[in-house]
C-alpha cells in the first residue's frame, strides 16, 4: 500500500514537472502569487532564474524603493527591493547570483532594519538550493498549484467586478449631477485626518533609536557590500524621498551617519533625488504613484539618462 502511494505521488510529481516545463517554455502558463510575501519570493526567484543579462545594474532597498517605476528604468536595471523587507534581504539574494551587477544602487533610508531570515531560507539560503530550483522549476513559488488556482479565480472576480462597475458608471452618467458633492468633501477631510494620524505615528516611531551604536544588521550589510566591491561591483547610494518632517528624525539621522562613516561621500557616489517638498506620500514614507514617477525620472537624470 505504501509503495503504491509512493509511486502514485511520484507519477503526479513527474507529470507536474513536465506540465510546468511545457507552460514555462510556451509562455502560456499562469504565473501567480498569494499576497505580498509570495510576491517577494516570486520577484527574488525571477531574478535568480529568469534574469540572465550578462551586464546589468541592480537596486536593493526597502518597500520605499519598490515604488521606483520598472517602465521608467532601462531594461538592464533590476529592482530587487521587496515589500516589508530590508536592504540586507536583497543583498542575501544577490549573493547567490552567478553573475553580479556592474553597479549596485543601495537605498539608505532604513539600512539598520531587521532582516527576514525565513524569507532568505525560503528563497536563497544556499547556492545548492538555488541550483535545485533552477533545474526543477516547479519548486519555485510562482509555479505552485495553489497560486495558479488563486490567480484563475482572481481573474474571474476582476471580470465580474468590471462588469458591475461599467453598469454602475452607465447608470450614474445618466443621472442628474449634484452641484455640491457633500460625500466627496467629507471623504477628503477624513483622508487628511487619517494621514495626519499616520504621520504622527511615524514621527513617534522614527524619533526612537533602538539598540547599541553597533547595529548587527548594518554590520552584515557592510560586510556583504565590501565583498561585492572586491568583486568589482560599483556601489552607489541613494535616499528615497519621505515626508519633510521625518528627514531629520533620529532614525534617519542615525542611518545617514552610519552609512557616511563607512562609505565616505567624498569617495562614493550618492544620488540626489531632489527636495522632499517636491514629493507627496501616502503614509509619510511611501511615495504616491505620481511622485513615484517623478522620483524615477530624478533617478534616471542622476544617471545621465533622459
Image: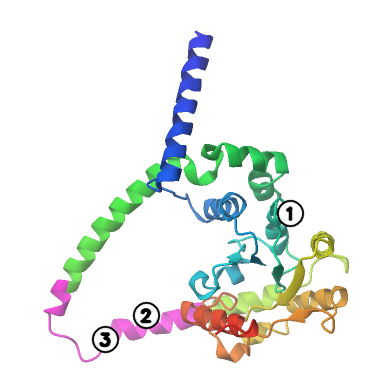
Does the magenta-highlighted stretch encompass residue 183? yes
Disc with the residue nearer the chain's start (2 vs 3): 3
In which quadrant of the rendered image does the C terminus lie? bottom right
Disc with the residue nearer the chain's start (1 vs 3): 1
Residue 207's image quarter?
A: bottom right
> Is the Cβ of the residue at disc 2 closer than 8 Å to that at disc 3?
no
x and y, in percent, of residue 276 in the image: 62, 88
Within 10 Å of the Cα at label 1, are there few (<14), some (14-19), or many (20+) other Cα atoms? some
The Cα atoms of the two marked residues, 2 and 3, are separated by 10 Å
Within 10 Å of the Cα at label 3, are there few (<14), some (14-19), or many (20+) other Cα atoms? few
x and y, in percent, of residue 204 in the image: 68, 76
Q: Which residues are magenta?
A: 170-195
- Please say which color scheme the image uses: rainbow
Mark 2 lies on residue: 187
What residue is rendered at 54% in x and 51% in y?
42
Query: From where the camera sits, is residue 126 visible?
Result: no
x and y, in percent, of residue 227 in the image: 83, 60
Relative vertical location of residue 198 with respect to residue 122 in this rendering, above or below:
below
The Cα atoms of the two marked residues, 2 and 1, are separated by 47 Å
Describe the element under mark 3 as helix, strand or loop. loop
Label number found at residue 95: 1
- Name the residue nearer the viewer: 41 or 15: 15
Magenta segment's dominant SS is helix
Query: From where the camera sits, is residue 124 visible?
Result: yes
Describe the element under mark 2 as helix, strand or loop. helix
Amino acid at each position: 500500500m505504501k509503495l503504491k502511494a509512493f509511486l502514485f505521488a511520484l507519477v503526479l510529481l513527474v507529470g507536474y514537472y513536465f506540465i510546468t516545463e511545457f507552460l514555462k517554455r510556451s509562455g502560456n502558463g499562469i504565473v501567480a502569487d498569494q499576497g505580498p510575501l509570495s510576491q517577494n519570493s516570486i520577484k527574488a526567484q525571477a531574478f535568480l532564474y529568469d534574469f540572465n543579462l550578462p551586464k546589468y545594474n541592480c537596486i536593493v532597498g526597502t518597500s520605499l524603493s519598490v515604488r521606483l517605476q520598472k517602465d521608467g528604468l532601462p531594461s538592464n536595471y533590476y529592482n530587487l527591493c521587496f515589500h516589508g523587507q530590508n536592504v540586507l534581504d536583497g543583498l542575501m539574494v544577490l549573493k547567490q547570483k552567478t553573475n553580479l551587477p556592474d553597479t549596485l544602487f543601495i537605498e539608505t533610508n532604513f539600512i539598520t532594519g531587521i532582516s527576514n531570515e525565513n524569507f532568505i531560507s525560503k528563497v536563497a539560503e544556499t547556492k545548492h538550493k538555488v541550483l535545485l530550483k533552477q533545474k526543477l522549476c516547479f519548486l519555485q513559488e510562482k509555479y505552485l498549484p495553489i497560486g495558479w488556482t488563486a490567480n484563475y479565480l482572481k481573474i474571474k472576480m476582476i471580470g465580474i467586478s468590471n462588469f458591475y462597475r461599467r453598469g454602475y458608471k452607465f447608470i450614474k452618467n445618466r443621472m442628474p449631477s449634484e452641484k455640491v458633492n457633500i460625500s466627496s468633501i467629507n471623504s477628503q477631510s477624513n483622508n487628511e485626518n487619517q494621514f495626519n494620524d499616520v504621520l504622527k505615528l511615524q514621527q513617534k516611531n522614527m524619533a526612537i533609536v533602538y539598540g547599541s551604536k553597533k547595529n548587527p544588521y548594518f554590520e552584515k550589510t557592510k560586510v556583504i557590500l565590501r565583498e561585492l566591491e572586491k568583486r568589482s561591483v560599483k556601489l552607489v547610494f541613494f535616499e528615497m524621498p519621505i515626508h519633510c518632517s521625518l528627514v531629520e528624525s533620529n532614525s534617519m539621522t542615525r542611518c545617514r551617519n552610519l552609512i557616511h562613516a563607512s562609505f565616505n561621500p567624498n569617495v562614493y557616489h550618492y544620488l540626489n533625488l531632489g527636495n522632499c517638498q517636491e514629493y507627496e506620500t501616502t503614509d509619510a514614507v511611501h511615495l504616491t504613484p505620481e511622485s513615484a514617477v517623478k522620483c524615477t525620472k530624478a533617478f534616471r537624470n542622476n544617471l545621465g539618462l533622459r
